[in-house]
Image (cartoon, rainbow, N blue to C red):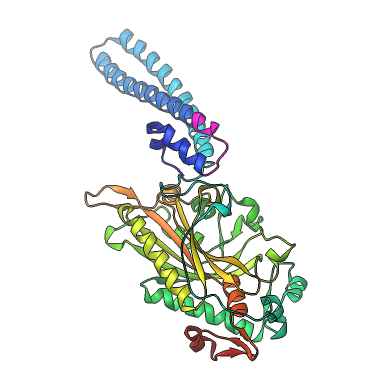
């Protein structure tokens, strides 16, 4: 949630940022400014009346001590009227604050100044590329055919058990999934992250805290009887560990990593873009999260991007890093870098990671703070990144490493997989 000071101090800057994010409901800005002004005026009136009640109460005692009953009774009537008005103001203030909150949470985060303008993925900026493009012969197969060939995954079985978009891995496919998860976690632990195993369902407060609600209700699976949501990423439970906490400065940065299954209802159902593992409803992912002092967050973002880049490089995959334009960024992000790897059989780029800085957008919702050198409580900055999401990584590993004798396993994965080839 954006700080109210931004609305009070620089409306034009706010509108420019919302325009860069392609946010249309800009009339909310004027509404929020008006609600905030009314609330502040009402608060002043409340405080003045409360001060008058306190002063009059003292005077009543003084009048009574002097036997001035008439003056005391007049003040009592005045105090009673003020108290009635105060009750009305308290109720009105509560209603105003609720309306102000409901309107403010509808606004996305402000984009960082480096975010390029644009509305579509085609307008994202390529920051850099790496790796070597594989040269496959004319008989190259997409990953869904390779999985059928080597009996690694069965989509029809997942459809039978659950529904479309819920793959079942088996044999060496299941082993490769496990190897990737273990390798990614160990890679993160070596970089100083602490491993967590969080719940895979969260309550409404947690989903609100990271910005999934009220923005993405339709994309989340909801266990309505209990009010729980299946997580779209372990970012949600990990960041909420610190909700309503004041972190000691010596414990920053907080660096967390976790594996979790992820659940998203947004998957499509037609065309090559959603075939196989390109887009599924349930998938595995390893996440990294950091909570840092605000002055260090953009250095931390670059460090996290470098960390994910080294991980992709270790898998020997061709990749590119994109700086997302305003219209392609998430609701909560201030700056996002996407990683894409090249699918040689499909001849297209597939997103495998997003690394984002949310600044205080999430911590303001969750009231995650730290005490600075002066002992003052300040909001932390929160960041996260996929390190990595498995489906498209697995798709590209299979496609890019296919050969006549089978699918070769990159050297970094071989100790975890227990072999160097799938055949």
Q: Quadrant of residue 296?
A: bottom left
**Closer to the camera in the image, 275 or 345:** 345
Q: Position of residue 13 (x, y in %)?
A: 42, 36
* Residue located farthest toward the top when viewing the structure as drawn: 70
From this view, report whether residue 275 is shown above or below residue 154: above
**Residue shown at 31%/9% (left/top)?**
71
Count of all numbered marks drawn on residues in the image: 0
Position in image of residue 15 (x %, y %):
47, 35
Identify whether 402 is placed above or below 56: below
Based on the picture, tell me whether residue 22 belongs to the magenta stretch.
Answer: yes
Front residue of 328/179: it is 328
Left or right: residue 295 versus residue 209 is left
Say left or right for 92 vs 153. left
Which x, y percent locates residue 305?
42, 64
Is 381 on the left-hand or right-hand side of 167? left
Magenta run includes residue 72: no
Identify the residue at horizontal 38%, vertical 77% (top origin): 190
Assign the C terminus to one quadrant of the image. Answer: bottom right
Toward the viewer: 148 or 6?
148
> Between residues 262 and 376, which one lies in front from this camera angle?
262
Residues in magenta?
21-31
Examine the rendered structure and indicate whether residue 22 appears above or below residue 69: below
- x and y percentages locating residue 368 in the rendered image: 39, 52
């Amino acid at each position: 949630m954006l700080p109210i000071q931004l609305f009070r101090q620089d409306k034009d800057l706010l509108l420019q940022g919302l325009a860069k994010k392609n946010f249309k409901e800009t009339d909310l800005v004027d509404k929020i400014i008006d609600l905030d002004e009314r609330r502040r005026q009402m608060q002043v009136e409340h405080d003045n009346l409360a001060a008058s009640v306190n002063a009059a109460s003292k005077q009543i005692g003084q009048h009574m001590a002097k036997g001035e009953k008439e003056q005391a009774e007049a003040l009592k009537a005045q105090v009673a009227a003020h108290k009635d008005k105060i009750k009305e103001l308290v109720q009105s203030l509560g209603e105003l604050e609720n309306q102000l909150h409901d309107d403010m949470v509808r606004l996305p985060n402000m984009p960082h100044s480096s975010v390029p303008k644009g509305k579509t993925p085609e307008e994202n900026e390529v920051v850099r590329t790496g790796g070597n493009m594989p040269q496959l012969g004319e008989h190259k197969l997409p990953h869904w055919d390779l999985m059928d060939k080597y009996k690694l995954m069965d989509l029809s079985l997942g459809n039978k058990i659950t529904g479309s978009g819920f793959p079942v891995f088996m044999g060496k496919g299941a082993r490769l999934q496990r190897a990737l998860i273990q390798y990614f976690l160990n890679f993160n632990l070596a970089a100083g992250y602490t491993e967590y195993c969080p719940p895979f369902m969260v309550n409404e407060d947690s989903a609100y805290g990271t910005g999934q609600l009220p923005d993405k209700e339709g994309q989340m699976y909801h266990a309505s009887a209990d009010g729980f949501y299946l997580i779209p990423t372990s970012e949600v439970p990990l960041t909420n560990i610190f909700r309503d906490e004041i972190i000691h400065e010596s414990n920053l940065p907080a660096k967390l990593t976790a594996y979790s299954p992820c659940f998203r209802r947004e998957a499509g159902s037609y065309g090559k873009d959603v075939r196989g593992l390109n887009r599924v409803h349930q998938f595995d992912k390893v996440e990294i999260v950091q909570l840092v002092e605000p002055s260090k967050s953009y250095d931390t973002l670059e460090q996290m991007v470098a960390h994910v880049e080294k991980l992709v490089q270790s898998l020997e995959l061709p990749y590119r890093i994109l700086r997302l334009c305003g219209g392609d960024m998430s609701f909560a992000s201030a700056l996002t870098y996407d990683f894409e790897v090249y699918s040689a059989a499909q001849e297209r780029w597939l997103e495998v990671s997003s690394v984002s800085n949310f600044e205080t957008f999430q911590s303001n919702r969750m009231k995650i703070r730290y005490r600075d050198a002066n002992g003052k409580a300040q909001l932390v900055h929160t960041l996260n990144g996929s390190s990595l999401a498995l489906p498209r990584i697995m798709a590209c590993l299979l496609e890019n490493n296919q050969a006549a004798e089978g699918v070769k396993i990159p050297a970094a994965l071989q100790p975890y997989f227990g072999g160097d080839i799938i055949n």
